[in-house]
Image: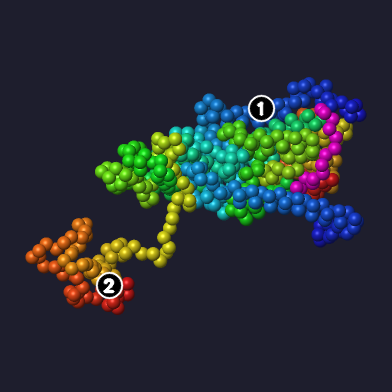
Amino acid sequence: MSAHTLRPGAEAIAEKGWLTAHKWLLLRRASQIGILLLFLVGPWFGLWIVKGNLNYSYTLDVLPLTDPYLLVQMLAAGQTPENLAWIGAAIVVAFYLLAGGRSYCSWVCPVNLLTDAANWLRARLGLKGSAHIGRAARYWILAMTLIVAAVTGTIAWEMLNPVSMLHRGLLFGMGLAWAVVLAVFLFDLFVMRQGWCGHLCPVGAFYSLIGKLSVLRVRLPAREACNDCMDCFAVCPEQQVIRPALKAINGAPPLILEANCTNCGRCIDVCSKNVFSFGTRFGAAVPTVAGAVSPALK
Amino acid sequence: MENASKPKAKWSQVSAASRRQFFADTARLACGVGLLGLGLGLYARHATALPPVALRPPGALPEAEFSAACIRCGLCVRDCPYHMLYLAKPGEPLSTGTPYFVARQAPCEMCEHIPCVKACPTNALDHALTDITKAKMGLAVLVDQETCLNFLGLRCDICYRVCPVLDKAITLEPQSNLRTGRHTLFIPVVHSAHCTGCGVCEKACPTEIAAIKVLPLQLARGQLSAHYRLGWVEKEKAGGSLVAPDVEHSYHLPEGMQYAPGKGLSVVPPGAEPALPQGGAVPPAPTFPKAFQGDKL
């Protein structure tokens, strides 16, 4: 009960030590910054390990990686790519089928660094209140971007997409991209908690579709040990994903199967009872798959 | 089936009020996103018009298709050995993230192996382009004759000499200089069949503002109506005139005068026969041209 007055994770730090209680967060930041640096050492130091950006990149002149969402928009707009882009998209889809769809959001996407900062600041400043838009809004926006691509015959979303704008801006020059990125930061800080990544971003929505089937999952091997301290809810960017697995809603297995879990691992960090761990979707008892998948959203 | 009846039962348990709320929420969301989509669509339409100074890399598809095919990755920019390509930044009047160059700043150097096209993972830069001299990035136009040094009578000739498609894309056509009455103007003439739109001429033009500029094809190019035929071409194809030959021209001149093209009017020298075609002469019987012989042309 003391957890309510302490900051989330305080108990875990006391139990496990600071480093263990920040293990996945640190690894995640290392991954986000490391990937960004891999891209940046090219333009900065002429060390071309990776060329391109998150839309499409070519690593060491052998490995093509294509954002499948961009590929789908291109197809909707009526164009087909070259072989390398197809191969790149297949590799990316295969990878995220293993690693969890929205792992892209928490382990790769540069905007996540900003929105995490906004949400951290929001908590520190004690900003309460948040605009209400359903978390399904992102799927509407995803559909909208594809319809607009088909109707206008252009990859229209790229003119607004803060994700590629920020990444491309860092590599090729920001222009007015900073304004769009700042808008996302301020939106998350003052207007809506977890607003961009958790409610609106169609890139994340697209990767969550891959995440429906992906292998790597957060498991709850010790969910009986839960003492309802609520720390995992406090830190989770997609809080709705935890409850079914933690509380065995409709006989759900101890396994987070929700597509929007970003595999950030922060719940593993902050749980002083070690309820959570990374694992696969397979194995262990899966009582009723139908019950497990049914979304108990609210 | 138990599963099939289950959601139905649930739905009927939902109160009318919360059902209404659900529809209201959905409508709100759909309309909000719809408005965003409308704005995005209009913005996208607006931004597909390329500003005239921005040229696309070699092999770029026509603008409408290009903005659908370009994945905005910047690999063409990275693989250009001359670093003359840029990705459009937000706020610039081009589709954000698409590649372009400005000829006056740095033109395309027309690499033989066209690395930018090879780097393109989509077909935005058409991989069918393997001969750089077939590229059509734009078309050079001598837009300001009043400031072109060659038009002013100097032998600048720079655009002609720097052109990578030398003596084909730009030729110098002699014209008499009517101002001095004794010199020749060497007028640079661009030939659209050979001009790749690389922009080297525009970059090299020594005047304060270039007199020759590369413009996008849709701006620079005219087109004859489809029914137009070039008489001299058709004549050569057919191996002879397709219409009745011109009647020999006759001049109605005062008595004792004669006219010869290039020489002008002169008095018929005494003793000479007066020039025949004075109206009285009978023109030779016409041989019927093909057009009158029932041929299908």
| Contact? badges 1 and 2 (CB < 8 Å) | no
**Does A244 appear above or below A79?**
above
Q: Residue at x 90, y 55 (%)?
A: B17
How far across and down, in percent of the image, does residue B255 sit? 18, 68
Comparing B282 with A240, the one in front is B282
How far across and down, in percent of the image, does residue A20 sit? 75, 24
Range of residues picked out in magenta: A124-137
Quadrant holding the C terminus of chain A: top right
How far across and down, in percent of the image, does residue B191 sit? 36, 49
**Does A4 appear above or below B242?**
above
Find residue A246 and name its label: none
How far across and down, in percent of the image, does residue B245 sit? 25, 70
Q: Which residue is mark 1?
A: A30
Label 1 and label 2: CA atoms lie apart by: 86 Å
Comparing A90 with B278, the one in front is B278
The kind of residue tagged 2 is Ala
The kind of residue tagged 1 is Ala
Label 2: chain letter: B
Label 1: chain letter: A
Instruction: Rate crowding at label 2 as few (under 14), some (14 to 19) or many (20 or more) other CA atoms within 10 Å.
Output: few
Check residue A12 for magenta coloring.
Answer: no
Name the front one of labels 1 and 2: 2
Instruction: Work out whether residue B161 can be spotted.
Output: no
Q: In the picture provided, is B1 more to the left or to the right than B131?
A: right
Q: Residue at x 83, y 54 (%)?
A: B24
Q: Which residue is mark 2?
A: B244
